[in-house]
């Protein structure tokens, strides 16, 4: 993955952003942007087409608070007692989708994102840029490019080193999904001992990982982790995922993430580019970019492609594979 070039940043007043929507919107099919209130915040933006809608904050973040088909229920979990809050020194989970930097360490990873973000909308791409983190010198940016005619959005995550010395980190994209539901991680294609002598996958376990927890299903084609609101104990697993996708199945829908695998790269957490965490009624579907050493002023980016499809999936692996395969064929891989 190549470091990303610096972007020109500006923060026009929100009324100017929305005026630009009305001027440019008709030139770009069915993609729409509008200002909406949400959860006590008044300066939120709804980005939508006829198949998919997402809602982001501008008063904190950058965060995605809502993802659904038009008029559908929110796939993301949010914490109602934290909505509408701004400012302060404490990190808040808020919910939804966020950008972190790996590996996970305190206090660097938990730098709060409680301040307003800069907004840039050109009629096609929506970019949200956070202030530089005071304690780390890192600046976060999320950019969204919504397809005009299908339930697909490209989410580009960027980290910039605004500090005076080189740092090592990896972009870490975390989607906090509402339970109950289940994460689906593809296994590597099966091959015989005669065909391949070397290992084809690696897995990372945390100190609190219990492989006998009933929320896991260790299958031949998939590993599944269920989000059970009655089970409060934390569970987490990580993988080097060469297939470039993972999914969350919930309430007749599937949230598909596509992301890159770079065989030449070095990944955090014992070599993970995919991690799944659950506790109670939330499940985090997390992807990671490669570790990068960023010189002052340099940046790095990590791309996810999101898809939201209807899905009637059974419990067996064969039923799940039959339900997922047609939708997977409609998605686009992310190249390193």
Image (cartoon, rainbow, N blue to C red):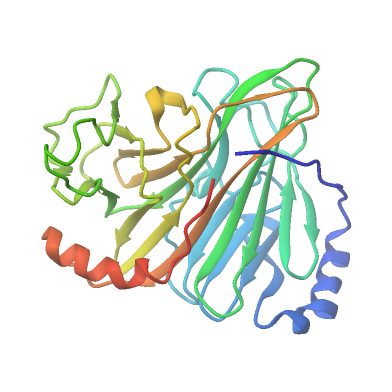
Residue shown at the point (71%, 19%) measured from the top left? 135
Observer-nearest residue: 331 or 84? 331
Observer-nearest residue: 234 or 219? 219
The quarter of the displayed image where residue 159 is located: top right
Farthest front residue?
A: 194
Residue shown at the point (34%, 64%) measured from the top left? 254
| Image coordinates for residue 213, horizontal then vertical, percent | 14, 35
| Image coordinates for residue 7, horizontal then vertical, percent | 81, 46
Tell me if I can see residue 81 in this picture.
yes
Residue 110 falls left or right of residue 235: right
Is 286 rendered above or below residue 221? above
Tell me if I can see residue 39 in this picture.
no
Residue shown at the point (53%, 37%) measured from the top left? 289
The quarter of the displayed image where residue 256 is located: bottom left
| Image coordinates for residue 14, horizontal then vertical, percent | 83, 61
The quarter of the displayed image where residue 146 is located: bottom right
| Image coordinates for residue 284, horizontal then vertical, percent | 39, 43
Farthest top residue?
A: 165
Observer-nearest residue: 335 or 204? 335
């Amino acid at each position: 993955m190549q470091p990303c070039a610096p972007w020109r940043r500006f923060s026009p007043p929100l009324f100017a952003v929305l005026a630009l929507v009305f001027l440019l919107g008709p030139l770009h099919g069915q993609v729409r942007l509008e200002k909406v209130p949400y959860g006590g915040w008044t300066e939120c933006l709804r980005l939508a087409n006829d198949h998919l809608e997402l809602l982001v904050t501008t008063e904190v973040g950058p965060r995605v608070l809502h993802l659904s088909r038009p008029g559908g229920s929110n796939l993301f979990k949010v914490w109602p007692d934290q909505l509408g809050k701004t400012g302060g020194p404490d990190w808040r989970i808020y919910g939804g989708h966020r950008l972190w930097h790996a590996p996970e360490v305190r206090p660097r990873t938990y730098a709060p994102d409680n301040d307003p973000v800069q907004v840039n909308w050109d009629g096609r791409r929506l970019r949200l840029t956070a202030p530089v983190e005071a304690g780390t010198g890192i600046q976060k940016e999320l950019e969204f490019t919504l397809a005009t005619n299908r339930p697909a959005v490209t989410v580009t995550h960027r980290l910039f080193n605004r500090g005076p010395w080189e740092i090592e980190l990896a972009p870490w994209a975390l989607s906090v999904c509402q339970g109950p539901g289940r994460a689906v991680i593809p296994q590597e294609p099966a091959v015989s001992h005669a065909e391949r002598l070397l290992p084809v996958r690696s897995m990372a376990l945390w100190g609190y990982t219990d492989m006998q927890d009933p929320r896991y299903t260790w299958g031949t084609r998939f590993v599944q982790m269920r989000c059970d609101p009655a089970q409060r104990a934390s569970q987490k697993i990580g993988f080097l995922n060469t297939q470039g996708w993972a999914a969350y199945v919930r309430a007749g829908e599937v949230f598909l993430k596509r992301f890159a695998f770079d065989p030449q790269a070095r990944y955090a957490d014992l070599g993970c580019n995919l991690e799944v965490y659950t506790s109670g009624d939330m499940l985090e579907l997390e992807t990671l970019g490669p570790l990068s050493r960023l010189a002052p002023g340099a940046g790095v980016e990590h791309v996810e492609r999101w898809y939201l499809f209807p899905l009637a999936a059974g419990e067996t692996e064969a039923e799940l594979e039959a339900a997922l395969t047609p939708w997977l064929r409609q998605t686009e891989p992310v190249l390193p």
